[in-house]
Image: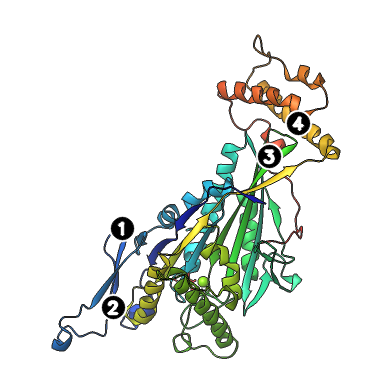
Amino acid sequence: MKEVKESRDQQLTVALRIRPISMVELEEGATLIAHKVDEQVVVLMDPMEDPEDILRANRSREKSYVFDVAFDFTATQEMVYRATTKGLIEGVISGYNATVFAYGPTGCGKTYTMLGTDHEPGIYARTLHDLFRAIEETSDDMEYEVSMSYLEIYNEMIRDLLNPSLGFLELREDAKGVIQVAGITEVSTINAKEVMQLLLKGNKQRMQEPTAANQTSSRSHAVLQVTVRQKSRIKNIMQEVRVGRLFMIDLAGSERASQTQNRGQRMKEGAHINRSLLALGNCINALSDKGAPKYVNYRDSKLTRLLKDSLGGNSRTVMIAHISPASSAFEESRSTLTYADRAKSIKTTVKRNLLNVSYHIAQYTSIISDLRSEIQRLKCKIDSQGATRPARGESSTRGCLCLGPSPRLWLPVILGQHERLDAAGGQRGGCRAQLGPQRKSRGGLRGHV
Ligand SMILES: Nc1ncnc2c1ncn2[C@@H]1O[C@H](COP(=O)(O)OP(=O)(O)OP(=O)(O)O)[C@@H](O)[C@H]1O
Ligand SMILES: [Mg+2]
């Protein structure tokens, strides 16, 4: 894989979402202490501080935090999606990596934001829908292959949610430092609906148990990866393939044993969750340190090893931090806001991933057959537009097929066809359904994250 020379430093985007206060919190007598004051500013009040206390009269009871964007109970799922994730899609389909991860204490709405409900779908569904739409809109000129994998980290072990029978999987680092999950199922998909079905299937396998803090508590970190390979429809003996990877991550929430009243297995899970989130917090601290560059210990947990590129490498990354507005959650809210605030100064270096495929002479037959299909597709399209005769001075596609076996000779002809189609305002659809990103290799074990 070759990386394009021009790379750009990019600041992590940090969004903050305050969920609505829950019935349980209200019944416990909690008051509202976290407020969004404008599009970017959130204020947290300390419920313990007594306004009558003269000794602390000069100390402010509230602290404000500025984020790239802030949401409160009035925000819809669509608003959160548009402000955080929608803008990443164009980059992903043209070879850039991106990550969106939901962060925050247990019960504060991470799974709600990422997965959502049937009526209020979250970021996963909205992103996949728009991703496939963006692919369709550009598929006259570009060919795509989309594949996905879905895993969870449960008690520091990696499970394949699309094929749990594979048991626990290992993380490997290749010679270029790219982290891969050995043997993970990578399924090629053709549309958003199919991906959603796979996602729902995977979610049924995910570890989720009720705790006192959240009836639907995620007991694992879940990582959905969608890989998009884009190449031009114009074939040549040297072909450039752009590979963009999108990670969407629903972390398990930090928790206090007292708050969740966890015992036994739930307590053990909580300890693993807290340990990996602590490792994540340490990485955020080291990466956001404005002083001399610090050693970043990604190796402390599987979560941080997996997130290495998303945090400090080649990825456009968005963190959506979540808090409860309730006074009973003050400590958790304060520490989440502190980490989210620090994360704002993390920088990643974004590069387009390019793969140069040079075809061997033995593969020319397949290139020729691809070109034939492409010509057929374009002919169908012309037919469907009623443009059956080529304009004067233009050569017909059929004539050019006789030119000889070199794909290079065909190139101007194919380009000419495209140009004509564009000029004719070529409508989408037609015969495209025969081609495009449709190669299915269900359950193919290609293995990488
Ligand atoms: N913005 C919101 N609007 C309406 N309900 C919400 C919102 N955020 C969270 N909830 C509700 O709050 C409860 C807890 O949310 P959720 O399960 O998403 O928390 P979580 O952060 O994923 O917790 P855990 O770390 O335990 O998995 C759920 O019943 C969810 O539907
Ligand atoms: Mg959850």
Please name the residue that numbered disc 4 is placed on: 371
- Farthest top residue? 392
Counting other residues with Cα less than 10 Å from the Cα at mark 2, is it few (<14), some (14-19), or many (20 or more)? some
Please name the residue that numbered disc 2 is placed on: 31
* Mark with earlier residue (1, 2): 2
Residue 195, compared with residue 67, is above or below; it is above
Residue 328 location, x and y as percent?
A: 34, 82
Mark 4: amino acid: Leu
Secondary structure category for the residue under label 4: helix
Q: Residue at (51%, 57%) from the top-left corner?
A: 349
What's the CA distance linking mark 1 and mark 2? 22 Å
Please name the residue that numbered disc 3 is placed on: 436
Numbered label attached to residue 155: none
Secondary structure category for the residue under label 1: loop
- Farthest front residue? 292
Mark 2: amino acid: Thr
Query: Circles 2 and 4: CB distance less than 8 Å?
Result: no
Please name the residue that numbered disc 1 is placed on: 39
* Mark with earlier residue (1, 3): 1
Mark 1: amino acid: Glu
Residue 188 location, x and y as percent?
A: 70, 52
Q: Tell me the quarter of the picture where residue 391 sits.
A: top right
Residue 221, compared with residue 1, is above or below; it is below
What's the CA distance linking mark 1 and mark 3? 41 Å
